[in-house]
Amino acid sequence: MPDVSLRGLSKHYGSIKAADNLSLDVRDGEYLCLLGPTGAGKTTALRLVSGLIRPDSGKVFLNGRDVTRLEPEERKAVLLSQTYSLFPQLTVAENILFGPDIKGASEEAKERLLADMLDLVRLTKRPDALPRELSGGMQQRTALARALASGADVLLLDEPLRALDARLRISLRHELRSLAKSLNITTIHVTHDQDEALVMADRIAVIRNGSVLQVGTPGEVFDEPISPFVANFVGQSNFVVGRLVKKGAFSEVRCENDMVIQARGCDCHEGQEVVVGVKVGNTEIIREGEGFFAGRIERVLFEGRNIYLDLDAGPMGPFSAKVPSWRLGKLNVGDTVQIRWSADKANVFPMPDIGLKEELRVE
Amino acid sequence: MPEVKLTNVSMRFGDVTAVDEVSLTIADGEYVTILGPSGCGKTTLIRIIAGILEPTEGRVCIDGKDMKGVEIEDRDLGYVFQNIALFPHLDTEDNVSFGPRVKDKAKEEQQKIARKYLELVKLLDKMEMFPSELCGGEQQKVSLARALATGAKLLLLDEPLSALDARVRVDLRYELRRIVKSLGLTTVHVTHDQEEAMSVSDRIVVMRAGGVVESGSPEQLYTRPKDIFTANFVGETNLLEGWVRERKEGKSVIELRDGSSIEVAICDREVGEGIVVSVRPEFVFPFTEGLHSHVHDIVYMGTYWRVRAQSVSEDEVEFDVPAHEGNLYQNGQEVYLMVNRKAAVVYPRPREGIAEATKLE
């Protein structure tokens, strides 16, 4: 299976930079999620890999070979669209064998391939069904089988779960990843859903405005985000603005109201204006003992495994926290509580040039 | 504020029964979400309430009045669609003041109303922009402001967040509840997204195959769902097959397929009866004894690790470990799993099988 390498790809549509000097390496057999908001350039990146569009500049390598000028059918990188694009008048079996048919594969080879594919995607009982007779999940598996039968060795998935119900999406995450992993096929999966990326990816590439901001394992992207945007996009964060007053293994940041908070070590210099980001899930709410500052609970929402709290932290502004739901009833609207976090769960960033509000825009 | 009352409402399209004898009362000022998988009849139901569809049987009353023959525009309700339907040639303010304008309110009054609701959805600064200049989340906020500006006391939301990105959806659902609650409106919100339903609703009505499965507060449905379908639909859960071995106050014993046993606090089935125990991943924990299993997958979820294991009883069991404990597991590792007995819910074993009883599509 090949690795995929994108080198300095740019693609402009008028003033819109759909790809802006985009570089990314995907390893052999890796499941990589390309995560970003609508309009970030995710689909453009996939189309550049598949050959459906050509870059204005930059190169695409598959397995070390420059394929930038090759046609899609010469690349073996198959793109699966959001809507699966199955042929509505063809059966499951005919859809799967569409590629091999065109290539003139022998009847015997086709029969064997079909049996393998149906088995793989658990559709052995439905080869004669038409797409409209299948559930959304089955249609998706058929499209996957068709891509694999066409001899793809790089799978490009464009929001493969978007058309499905929320709960079904969660159930199918594991299945889709297992399928790709069992075939050891290199996969690039585009999504706007950070939970989906965390669950499915070997590595996540966060993309915005046509460029890759950060590539890393789910743990790296979640715990060590490179910018406030990434911190807030991959799991919601609270932010505090202040000046770095102490550097070291841990940072100390003095906020406008002279409150001092702690965070991880950083590369900023003392005196610099910084932003501290801490995930709502890592924001701790304590009733006894001392936190960094106090807050008043404004709203309590039960969300299943967690309860979601909105707090008014006075001069520190609004804060949110997610705490385990066994604490429901113990934290009530109107209560004054202490807010803290462990220093290694908070990240320090230089104040973005474009301002914090603009930096955090998710669409 | 109006109460909505459905009595034995059915909707048949030829041989297909989309809604099957649904009776449901939505109280004055209540925020109710109708939750269910695709094809369960939830969209048909909200359209019936709106007056877009006339039910084949049954009665719809709003604010005590029978709605038979009453058109959508005479029902005094605001409707927000999944596919954002703003007037493209009108700016934000004119979109929002559309309702007051057709009601022939004075120009000044129109402006005042538009501004009031744009302030509520925090879009006053975008008053002069056209829909094409706004992003998806903002467009949907304008749709909401427009629905509210009609002055309707009943708000119908038809998958209002489905077309948006996951991250935008999360921010907007908190906003949605804040706005609606601050106005005290009666709200019916249709969605297939169980997380969305949890965080916006006072009460969730779970639908499947045209009928209501059950209804309750988010907390009730998550912690003690009455039906096994709900248990699996409103959140992830482990479903373990077994038999009731012993019944005792506060501590009944369930024998699983491999002969090991777990304890549950509440069990209303008889000794010897075949049952299914539902327990969510955050309430399963490794111990020195319990369900003998092997780890085969570990996923980082940010604030916790989700560990997947296969038990010798052939049950698939998932459990969560807080992230700060570090990743203590590896593939192939042997573990013994216990469940928090207060968090376990016991169901009779479904005649059609677990897979069929919990099918999502």
Image (spheres, rainbow, N blue to C red):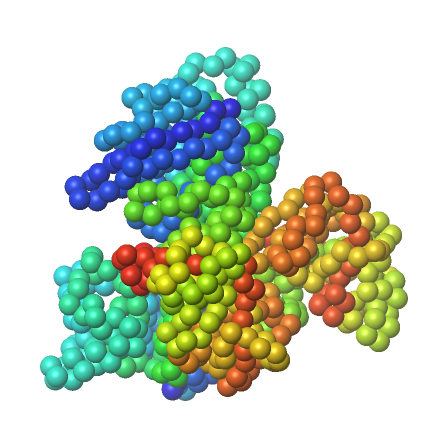
Q: Nearer the viewer, residue B32 or A6?
A: A6
- Residue A68 percent across, percent down from the top left: 31, 24
- Residue A61 percent across, percent down from the top left: 38, 25
Q: Nearer the viewer, residue A20 or B286?
A: A20
Quarter of the image holding residue A9? top left
In screen coordinates, is B286 left or right of A243? right
Above or below, A316 against B246 in this view is below
Q: How many dots with numbers?
A: 0
Above or below, A64 against A190 in this view is above
| Residue B329 is at least partly visible in this image | yes
| Residue A280 is at least partly visible in this image | no
Report the quarter where the C terminus of chain A lies: bottom left
- Residue B189 percent across, percent down from the top left: 42, 69
Quarter of the image holding residue A234? bottom left
Q: Nearer the viewer, residue A49 or A287?
A: A287
Q: Residue at x 73, y 40 (%)?
A: B332
In screen coordinates, is B140 left or right of B24? left
